[in-house]
Amino acid sequence: MEIKMPIKTYGNYLVSIRHGEEENRERCQQLRIRQLSAEEQQKAYKDQGIPGEAMPTHQITFYDFGCKRIIEGKLMENEADRAVFRVKDKDYAFSPFIPKGA
């Protein structure tokens, strides 16, 4: 499935990480999103007994404060202005960063 939100190589993005009632917002750079192949899902998740509805569908790579972060999550929302992924019990919502006054 193609991600509807435009992703630029060196763009800045806002990532909101929600866990229960808590929400943290940060900026990130160099966002990359790729869909996991059926073989990768089989090897990493089905063999461990993870049910299909909880199985990650995408690998997300981004830089946060200079540190590379790689997560695998299930696509929950796919809109033109945001993409939301469920990673275990957290929701990662990515959207383009728009500076104030722009």
Image (tube, helix red, strand yellow):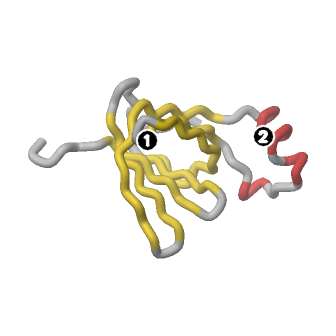
Residue pushed farthest top? 9
Q: Quadrant of the N terminus?
A: top right
User: Residue drawn at (62%, 48%), measured in percent from left and top?
Assistant: 73
Q: Amino acid at mark 1?
A: Asp
Number of numbered discs: 2
Q: Which residue is mark 2?
A: 41
* Amino acid type, residue under disc 2 in the picture: Gln
How crowded pointer 1 is (Cα within 10 Å; few <14, some 14-19, many 20+) is rated as some
Pointer 2 local density, CA inside 10 Å: few below 14, some 14–19, many at least 20: some
Residue 26 visible, this orientation: yes
Which residue is painted at 81% across and 32% down in the image?
Answer: 39
- Image point (49%, 52%), residue name: 84
Q: Is residue 63 left or right of residue 33?
A: left
User: Regarding mark 2 in the picture, which secondary structure is present there?
Assistant: helix
Q: Which residue is mark 1?
A: 64
**In the image, residue 90 lies at what x, y percent?**
57, 61
Q: Position of residue 78 (x, y in %)?
A: 48, 47
Examine the rendered structure and indicate whether residue 39 appears above or below residue 96: above
Quick one: which residue is furthest to the front in this view? 66
Q: Is residue 14 left or right of residue 102?
A: right
Residue furthest to the bottom in view is 21
Quick one: 71 or 39, which is closer to the camera? 71
Q: Which mark is residue 98?
A: none
Res. 81 in view: no
- Distance in Å between CA atoms under marks 1 and 2: 26 Å
Q: Secondary structure at mark 1?
A: strand
